[in-house]
Image: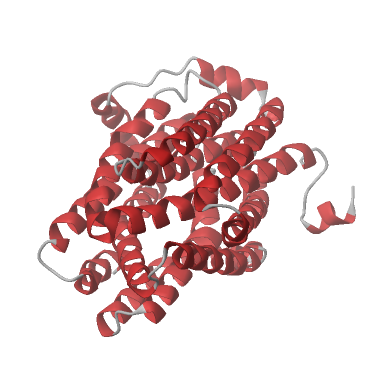
Amino acid sequence: MSPVLRRLQIQPGEAGPFGWSALVLLLVNLASFLLNNYGETTFLKRFGVEYLPLITAVNAVVTFFLPSLFAGRIGRIRGDRQLVLVLSGYAILALLLRLLVPLDIKLLYPLIYVLKSQFTILIAFIFWNVANDLFSTRQSKRLFPVITAGGLLGAIAGNLATPALDMVLPTDELLPVFSLVVGLAAGGTLRLGRYLPASRVKATAGTKQGSLVSELRRIRPLFRQSALIRILLLLALLPNLVIPIINYQFSFVADMSFASESSLIRFFGYFRGIQNGIALLLSLMMGRLYGRFGLAVSLMFHPANYLLVFAGFLVRFDLVTAVYGNLSAGILRRAVNTPAGNALYSLLPEKDRVLVRSFLRGTVVRVGILAGSALLWFSNMVMHPRYLACYGLLFAG
């Protein structure tokens, strides 16, 4: 075994699934941030920041219904194959959208905004289901932070590539670049699928997904029996009530601060590249953090920071506060909260894991996003974006 693998605590037999998992997440995040920077910039500058609360609400409705199509097929289609289908579909769709840009269709930009948001949600949902099937509970505690680090490398590359590509290519050419990277990720997923345990594939293949009512009936006894599942419910719900608010405040301030499309997309690229670079450095130390403080205490850092951020917005609504708020929230979410939350899912009994993951990451997350976005839309009609921080303080507290 190479010294690098030993240093990363990769044991014999884990190098293959670990390597392909990290590579796929790297490529997916690289593509995701290329599309995210393009989609957000073009929406703000070509459609208008005043429509951001409305498109956030529309996106939340789509988020509520669309992932259920994939959640309903988790038991019938292997996760790796599902991931290949989604990645391939997005690659083709991005090329079609690029062909439509010269037609100057204004509604194209809300569509791209929704698609870039759904890409992140769908891929994260499917990828971490695959990862949980690949690795045991003990393995996930060691490997998930390192796999997440691979994803952060991709996020850094995607963000720093955005301004670099914008300097040498027209902004709209980011769409074909996105398609190329997503195609490579689909190829990597095909290789990753070879490592899925046959026993888990067979066990999952016969599972059927019922209606939301039947899902609630099946999961209700688990909530009564398990405090861990109740904790996971709060971890899935509350952050998704807050995220639409802090994202809107950040985008609103950024749009006011940068007049041109080029300057805004370069700001997004450099800012998010730095954000993910810091998150990567922290993620390399997360194993020690979890070992010293435990998963429960580590998960408290994120909501505590939200309290500080929203208090800052009430005092000073400008680019400095927006940069700190989005920077710190993104770092803690990616480097601490996400891997810790994923490790907690692995503590569940295997017979309950698929149902709980599907319900919490699907239904509960969508309810949180929908409720937070609806609150943002209605409140923005009667108050300045600065005072939306009051809701953030309430939910984070």
Q: Position of residue 76 (x, y in %)?
A: 48, 18
Observer-nearest of 339 and 292:
339
Which residue is at a point 21% across and 71% down the rendered structure image?
Answer: 390
Above or below 338: residue 294: below
Q: Position of residue 387 (x, y in %)?
A: 20, 73
Q: Position of residue 255 (x, y in %)?
A: 35, 67
Which residue is at a point 53% across and 25% down the rendered structure image?
Answer: 85
- Asked where in the image residue 294 lies, by quadrant, the reply is bottom right
Report whether residue 10 is seen: yes
Above or below 251: residue 78: above
Q: Quadrant of the C terminus?
A: bottom left
Which residue is at a point 66% across and 52% down the rendered structure image?
Answer: 150
Observer-nearest of 47 and 269:
47
Q: Residue furthest top?
A: 206
Report whether residue 347 is seen: no
Q: Position of residue 240 (x, y in %)?
A: 33, 54
Above or below 244: residue 200: above
Observer-nearest of 333 and 133:
333
On screen, residue 312 versus residue 136, left or right, reads: left
Which residue is at a point 25% across and 43% down the rendered structure image?
Answer: 58
Q: Residue furthest left?
A: 382
On screen, residue 379 versus residue 130, left or right, reads: left
